[in-house]
Image (cartoon, coloured by chain):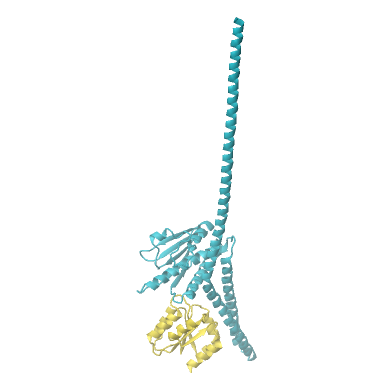
Chain colours: A yellow, B cyan
Amino acid sequence: MKILVVDDETDIKTLFEQRFRKEIKEGIMRFDFAYSGEEAIQYMQRNNHEAVLILSDINMPGMSGLELLEKIKKEQYVPPPVVMIITAYGDEETKHKAESLGADDFLTKPLNFASLKDKLKSNFI
Amino acid sequence: MQVNSSNETNYIVFIIAALVVLILLVGFILYFVVSYRSKQKDYQLLEDQKKKIDEQKHILEKTLEELRATQQQLIHAEKMASLGELTAGIAHEIQNPLNFVTNFSELSTELISEMKTAVEHHELNEVLSLADDLALNMEKINFHGQRAGSIVKGMLQHSRSGTPQKELSDVNRLVDEYVRLSYHGMRAKDKTFNASYDLNLDPEIQPFPIIPQEIGRVILNLVTNAFFSVNEKRKRTFENYQPLVKISTQKKEQEVIITIEDNGEGISDENASKIFQPFFTTKPSGQGTGLGLSISYEIITQGHQGKIELNNHLNQGGTSFTISLPL
């Protein structure tokens, strides 16, 4: 399974690559990065028919994470990608909105990487 | 007989002369009395008028003083209102770097633990690789700490009253910072807000003397208006409309040009002539003070001897503002 991290903050790449250095080194996980919703859509079109887990931020210039989620769920990719929403705003309203759009999980920033690692591993088993 | 007659004539002449002298004397006295009274009256009238003028002058001075105080209060109120608009953007802009500080420092603790294990196993290459990662992390922590610090500094400068001084400032950094604040502020305030922005900053621009917090306010005002306009158009347009705000800086001989362009609703010709007037706003009640553009105009033209111009593209849709700042 490929993991696509979508965030307009480019340092997220360094953070994930260091945090999951062992898993990447051992080939257990593979991370790709998109810095906007539009880039994520292009990635999905290129990787159609592949199992993808998307970790997306909400607040990004242009297409927001929630719009990306809506588009991805509407496209009905096969296999359907798992979408986890990550946001700095942990309010209930946003969480309900994400859930109603079909988000598989909702995480808040700063990321708890221990918990994220468990969640990612459970998706690989 | 002749002598008596002559004496009598002399007597009569004397009496007549005396009477004439008396009449003249009385006449002069009367003239002086009347003239004196008239002058007294004139003098009194002048005194009264002077008093009235003094009173009016005092009232005018007081009114002017009150007007100046009200103007200062309004400028302060506008500053606070825009600061209020910024709050959500500031929260986001500070939260993001702080998240990185938290995550990179947690990660560094783990890397040190891994490094100890690698040292125990004499894995020199692994130790060096971990040391490189740690060095990178420290850089990131420092960068994001400073990023959060500069947001707080900008916020404090934004709300500070008094007369700020010009200082050598990086206008590109200022534009980037305030555009992000405005964007995230709009996004946090209105969950349905959706727009793209495009920054095109000229790397040739060196720091030059401006009042950073004031230029920041102008950028914030213009960019927030642009985002508001494209978002309003998006709400009313069902066709394939892409809301977009383009912000660019450009060095041109002895001046720096900042352009803020949107493909929003545009400004009617009637409103275009009024936009720099105080209290003029087309925003719904409670959403604009109507002071943003008039203060921006003052900041650019009086505070920086620059120019600010509206280029209305109503026919094609949208508006653009051009600011010229002398170097």
Of residues B302 and B41, the one nearer the viewer is: B41
- Looking at the image, is B231 positioned above or below residue B60? below
Is B236 left, or right, of A10 in this rendering?
left
Give how far across and how far down residue B131 sits, in percent. Answer: 61, 83
Is A21 left, or right, of A79 in this rendering?
right
Report the residue that reaches farthest toward the front. Answer: B1
Give how far across and how far down residue B46 sits, in percent. Answer: 57, 40
Report the residue that reaches farthest toward the top. Answer: B1
Of residues A89 and B22, the one nearer the viewer is: B22
Q: Quadrant of residue B21?
A: top right
Is A3 left, or right, of A19 in this rendering?
left
Q: How many marks?
A: 0
- Give the residue displayed 51% in from the left and 70% down from the top: B85
- Looking at the image, is A18 positioned above or below residue B89? below
- Give the residue displayed 56% in from the left and 60% down from the top: B72
Can the viewer see residue A97 in this picture? yes
- Looking at the image, is B43 positioned above or below residue A21? above
Q: Quadrant of residue A20?
A: bottom right
Give how far across and how far down residue B282 sits, in percent. Answer: 43, 64
Give how far across and how far down residue B3 sits, in percent. Answer: 61, 6
Can the viewer see residue B132 in this picture? no
